[in-house]
Every structure is written in structure tokens, then in C-alpha cells.
Image (spheres, helix red, strand yellow):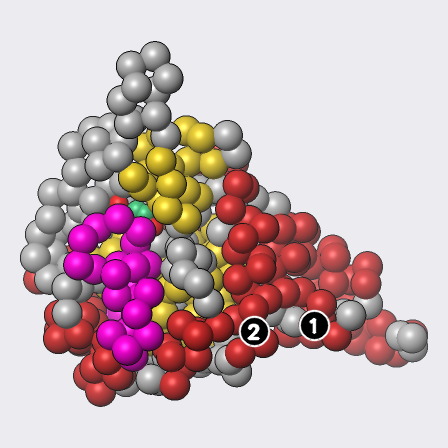
């Protein structure tokens, strides 16, 4: 039962938007919404539209040690309720990308998290160190891309190799290390525990689900790489289940990701155990203002249900 005084003080907070702030392992988020890795370009300019759209933090596309062109077209195909993409981790390489990080940090007032992929623990470490030195507020390890050989999920599906990568990165930087988990595993609990025991500060759950599409007329697989990663509303129930299971097995904050397109989706992830959420594919259908719309919806939900902060709803479903 909320007393009238409590109610009033809550309203004051609400006007200041305080119930929506999240302290994510030291990163101060004005609201729980973040840009997911992979969906938009790399440049400082594209980040401006994301900030205007209301995101509280940005995760970049995944950056490797060397420049990489990525796969030939087609790299993306529309599925029912989602997208399947196999870009092939195209990126300019960390030596070039540090310029973008410095440029973005000069005007960004929200945390910038650099997504990193490598072919060995040593490579992850080198890239993470350069990103942190250039000003990244945190790194997110992409150990879950479902289709590029010798990186991504080939690392994140193996608890031993994953632990080695996380440990190496942790020795090299003093910024938070997020580990982005793959749903393409037998036990997400096992992988989540391995990552946190090795020192992961937070987990992002989940990356895309391995998928493919075939043209019935020609019998040809549509993506040039044949298989890709499914994102969007189709994967949301899988992602919610992964967050729920990870929450049961680790103590670090979990960032929910996978098919979030409205405030109700965001709240569902939080009830399952997410401290913050990332939005990617829905930007393509709803535009960059989705961050504001989702945040507003969360705010209305908190008020209606009598919660004083986002924190209060994290993991509530585990007690039901
Ligand atoms: C790609 C990378 C990912 O991490 C993912 O989930 C899907 C696609 C890519 O660059 O192809």
C-alpha cells in the first residue's frame, strides 16, 4: 500500500525521471534502454540520431583487429516476425575505429560500449585495450555471432575458451566487461556461470538465433553465407527464457536483448531479470524514437503498479 506522502515524493522523482535511472556496473543510464550492437553504422554521426531518439547508451557494431569486408549480398532477408542477417562482421579494424571512438566521445553524453570480436583470447584483449584507451566506457564481447568461423559462438559455446577470453580481457582493462551470450547452446546457465566466474561484469542476453531461409522457386538458400542470425519479435520468447535462466545462475546484472519492440516487451525482460535492455531490429520498423516511446511506457507501468524504480521490477517473476 502506498501512503499519500510516499506517493507525492514518488511523483517528484517521476518529474525528475529518477525512477528510470539505472546504475549498470558504474555506468549511469538515464533510462534502461540501450542501442544493441550491429544494427546501425559505426560513425559518430549515426550515434547522434540514437541519442536524439532517447537511448541511454550505445553499443557499437563489432570491431575486430583487422579490417574485414564481410560477405557478398544478399546479407539480409526478411523472415516472418524478424530478420535473418549474415553480414560477416564487416568493420574497419580497431586501429581505424579508435578515431571514431575518440570523435564520438567528444560529443556523446551517454556511455559508449564498444563491441569486440576476435579469433583468440589475445586478440580480444588487444582490441578491448585499444577501445578502452580510446575512451570506450565498457566493452561487450561478441562471443555469440552464430556464423563466422573461429570466432563468435565458436568461442561462446565453449565454457573453457570463453573463460580464457574473459580473463584475458579483464587483465588488460579496468572498464566493465559485458559478455554477449549465444542462445545457440544446450545450457545458458553453464555459459553464464563460466563467463561470470572468469570476471564478466555483466551479461547481455541474447545474440541472434542461428537460422536460414531458402527460396522455394529456385531451391537456393537466400543468404550468400546460407546461414545467418535471426533477430526481431520471433526470438523474444527465447530471449526472455534465456534471461530468466541466466538470472537464476549468476549475480551480475543482465542486459536483455532480443525482439524488444515496445514497453511491454521491455518490462517482460525486466521481470525475467534484466536490469536494462537493448533494442536493435525494431529500429528498422519503428525508427529511432523507439527508445523514448519504450521509456515512457516503462514509466507509466511503474507508476500504475506503484513501483518507485526500475530496479524494483528486476527479477520479480522469480518470486511468483
Ligand atoms: C553478424 C554478427 C552477429 O553477432 C550476429 O548476431 C548476426 C550477424 C554479422 O556480422 O554477420
Local packing at callout 1 (Cα closer than 10 Å; few below 14, some 14-19, many 20+) is few
Residue 268 pos. (x, y %)? 65, 57
The one nearer the camera, 163 or 256, is 163
Circle 2 SS class? helix
Q: Are marks 2 and 1 in contact (CB under 8 Å)?
A: yes
**Measuring 50% from the left and 30% from the top, which residue is drawn there?**
80
- The answer to whether residue 169 shows anywhere in this view is yes
Residue 29 pos. (x, y %)? 49, 68
**Measuring 67% from the left and 65% from the top, which residue is drawn there?**
271
**Measuring 58% from the left and 59% from the top, which residue is drawn there?**
241
Image quadrant occupied by the C terminus: bottom right
Q: Earlier in the sequence, mark 2 or mark 1?
A: 2
Image quadrant occupied by the N terminus: bottom right
Q: Which residues are magenta?
A: 134-163
* Residue under label 2: 247
Residue 175 pos. (x, y %)? 31, 80
Q: Estimate the spatial distance between the alpha carbons at disc 2 and disc 1, rounded to whole Å.
A: 9 Å
Q: Quadrant of residue 12?
A: bottom right
Q: Is residue 37 left or right of residue 52?
A: left
Amino acid at each position: 500500500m502506498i501512503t499519500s506522502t510516499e506517493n507525492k515524493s514518488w511523483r517528484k522523482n517521476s518529474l525528475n525521471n529518477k525512477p528510470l535511472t539505472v546504475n549498470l556496473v558504474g555506468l549511469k543510464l538515464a533510462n534502461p534502454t540501450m542501442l544493441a550492437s550491429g544494427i546501425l553504422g559505426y560513425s559518430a554521426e549515426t550515434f547522434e540520431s540514437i541519442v536524439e531518439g532517447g537511448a541511454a547508451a550505445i553499443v557499437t557494431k563489432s570491431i575486430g583487429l583487422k579490417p574485414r569486408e564481410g560477405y557478398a549480398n544478399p546479407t539480409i532477408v526478411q523472415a516472418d516476425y524478424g530478420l535473418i542477417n549474415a553480414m560477416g562482421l564487416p568493420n574497419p579494424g580497431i586501429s581505424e575505429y579508435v578515431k571514431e571512438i575518440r570523435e564520438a566521445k567528444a560529443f556523446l553524453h551517454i556511455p559508449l560500449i564498444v563491441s569486440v570480436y576476435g579469433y583468440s583470447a589475445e586478440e580480444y584483449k588487444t582490441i578491448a585495450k585499444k577501445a578502452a584507451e580510446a575512451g570506450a566506457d565498457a566493452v561487450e564481447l561478441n562471443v555469440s555471432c552464430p556464423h563466422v568461423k573461429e570466432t563468435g559462438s565458436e568461442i561462446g559455446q565453449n565454457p573453457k575458451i570463453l573463460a580464457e577470453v574473459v580473463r584475458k580481457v579483464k587483465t588488460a582493462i579496468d572498464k566493465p566487461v559485458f559478455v554477449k551470450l549465444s542462445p545457440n547452446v544446450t545450457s545458458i546457465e553453464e555459459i553464464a556461470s563460466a563467463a561470470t566466474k572468469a570476471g564478466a561484469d555483466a551479461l547481455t542476453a541474447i545474440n541472434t538465433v542461428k537460422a536460414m531461409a531458402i527460396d522455394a522457386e529456385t531451391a537456393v538458400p537466400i543468404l550468400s553465407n546460407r546461414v545467418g542470425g535471426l533477430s526481431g519479435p520471433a526470438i523474444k520468447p527465447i530471449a526472455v527464457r534465456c534471461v530468466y535462466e541466466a538470472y537464476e545462475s549468476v549475480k551480475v546484472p543482465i542486459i536483455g536483448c532480443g525482439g524488444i519492440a515496445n514497453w511491454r516487451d521491455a518490462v517482460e525482460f525486466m521481470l525475467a531479470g534484466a536490469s536494462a535492455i537493448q533494442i536493435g531490429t525494431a529500429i528498422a520498423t519503428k525508427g529511432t524514437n523507439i527508445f523514448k516511446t519504450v521509456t515512457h511506457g516503462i514509466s507509466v507501468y511503474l507508476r500504475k503498479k506503484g513501483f518507485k524504480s526500475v530496479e524494483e521490477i528486476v527479477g520479480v517473476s522469480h518470486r511468483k
